[in-house]
Image: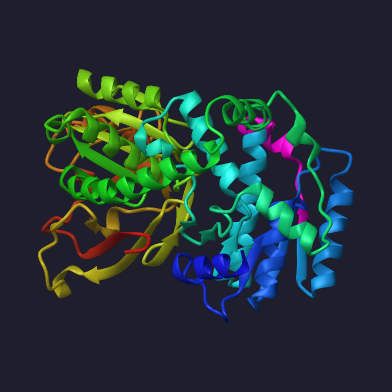
Amino acid sequence: MLDNIDSILHQECKLYDNNLVLVGVSGGPDSLCLLNILHKLGYPTIAAHVNHALRPEADEESQFVNQFANQLGVDFISCRVDVRAYARDHSISIEEAAREVRYQYLDKLAQRLKATKIALGHNADDQAETVLMRLIRGTGALGLTGMSIVRGKIIRPLLQIKREEIEGFLKEQNLDFRIDSSNLRQDYLRNRIRLELLPHLKRNYNPKIIDTLNRTASILSAQEDYLREEILKEFGKVAKAQKEKISLDLDKLFSYDIFLQREILRLVFERLGGGGFKASFNLVERVLGLAQQKKAGRRVFLNKDVLAEISARHLNFYKVKKTEKDQALIFPGIVESKRFGIRLDSEAIKRKNLKEKPYSKDEMTAFLDWDKLKPPFILRNPRTGDRFRPLGMKGTKSLKDFLTDLKVPRYEKERVRVLTSKGEIVWILGYRIGDEFKVRKTTEDVLKIEAKESGE
C-alpha cells in the first residue's frame, strides 16, 4: 500500500520530496493512516485538526490527535469552532456547516504556512457513498464523478484505497484511532448509505459494489475532463466575465443545445461561488426559465452570495454586495477607495495650460469646472429621489430614469457610484457628468478626474 500511495503522490498529486503538506486529521482511521504514511514516506507534514465542538468527546479527540502527531514528531495545529452558531448564522445544516468551516480553516492555514498541498483522508468507500448520495438526491452524469484525487491544492491520496485496507494497515502498525460517534447516527443520509444501503447492495446484489461505483466515478471523471474543455470553449463565446459579474448573451445561449445551456450555467455558478457552490438541477432550470421570459429586471437569488438578473439582451450574474457607506473625498490628489473598489486620480489644471480637449474620451474620465465645485465631496451609491441635469440636457432628470433609459440592469443601478459636491450630483461614474459642472469657455481652472476600477 505504501508503494501504491507513493506512486499516486508523485504521478497524480505532483507532490515532491520537499513539498510541505498540511494534513487534515480528525482522529479517525483514514486521516491518521494518511498522516502516518506521509511521514513514513519522508514528506514534511503538519497535522491540522478542527474541533467542531459538537460532541462531548470532541476535546478528548483533539488531545488524542495532538499526542499522535507528537509521537511522529509532526507539528500540530488546531482550532475550535462553534459549528452550531455558524450553521444558524448561514442558514445551513450542521453537516454542511462543519464541512465549510473545516475547508475554510485548512485553506487559510495552508496559505499562512505556505503549504504546497492540503491532504485529506477520503477513501474508496467514501467515494462510493458520495456517488450513491448524489444519485439519490438527483444529479446528471457529471455529478456522478464523485470526488477527485486532486482539486486545486487539495489532494486525496487514499481515494482508491478501501476502508478495510486502511484499518488493516493501522492494525499491522499497532496504531490506535478514534471513531466519530456521529458516524453512527441514522439521521444523516451519508450514514444511512454507509450503514444500511451499501451493506445491503454488497450482500444481495454485487459483492464488489465499492469497486463498481469507484470505476463508474473514474470513467465519468475522464468524460468530465473532456466535456469541460469543450464547455469552456463555448463559454468563451457566450460569456463576458468580470471580477464579480458574468454576462451571458441570451441569443447565443439559446442557440445551444439544452445540455450546453445547463453546463454553461453551472460553470457560471461555480465561478462566482468560488468553486464550492454546486447548483441543483431545479435551480438551473429555474434560471433558464427566467431567461426565456426575457423580462428585463426579473431576478433570482441563487444563494446568499450570487444573484441572476435579466437585462434587455443578457442574463447577468453578480456577486452580491451590500450598498456601501458614503465616503468623503479630497481633491485634487489620489484616492484609493477600497469601499467602492475604485481609484480616483485628480489634478487641477489651468484652462490655458490644458493640452487636451476638456471632453471625456470615455465615461471614466471627467473634466469639471473647478471653480463650480465646493466641498464636501462625497462618493456614494444612489438614493431615492436623486435628480441631476445630465450633460447636454436643459432640465433635470431622476437618476433612476436616466439609468433606465440607458438600459442599465437593476442590480447595477443600485450600486452605481455617485460623486457629489455640496450635495449636488457632479458625476455618475461610468455614465455622465452634470451639465452645470462642465468646462465652459469662461472656465479658468479645470479638475480632471480619472477613475480606475481597483486592480486595473
Residue 273 occupies quadrant: top left
Residue 39 versus residue 192 in the image, above or below: below
- Residue 191: x percent and y percent? 67, 31
Residue 252 versus residue 421 in the image, above or below: above
Viewer-nearest residue: 106 or 131: 131
- Residue 293: x percent and y percent? 21, 18
Identified at 76% across, 55% down, the residue is 79
- Residue 210: x percent and y percent? 54, 40
Name the residue at the bottom extreme: 18
Is residue 251 found left or right of 402 in the rendered image? Answer: left
Viewer-nearest residue: 396 or 326: 326
Residue 197 versus residue 378 in the image, above or below: above
Report the colour scheme. Answer: rainbow
Instruction: Point out the image quarter for the N terminus.
Output: bottom right
Q: Which residues are magenta?
A: 78-94
Identified at 80% across, 75% down, the residue is 73
Identified at 51% across, 72% down, the residue is 15
Total marks shown come to: 0
Residue 107 occupies quadrant: bottom right
Viewer-nearest residue: 152 or 306: 152
Is residue 293 found left or right of 284 in the rendered image? Answer: left
Residue 284 occupies quadrant: top left
- Residue 217: x percent and y percent? 43, 43
Asked if residue 329 is among those painted magenta in the image, a careful observer would answer: no
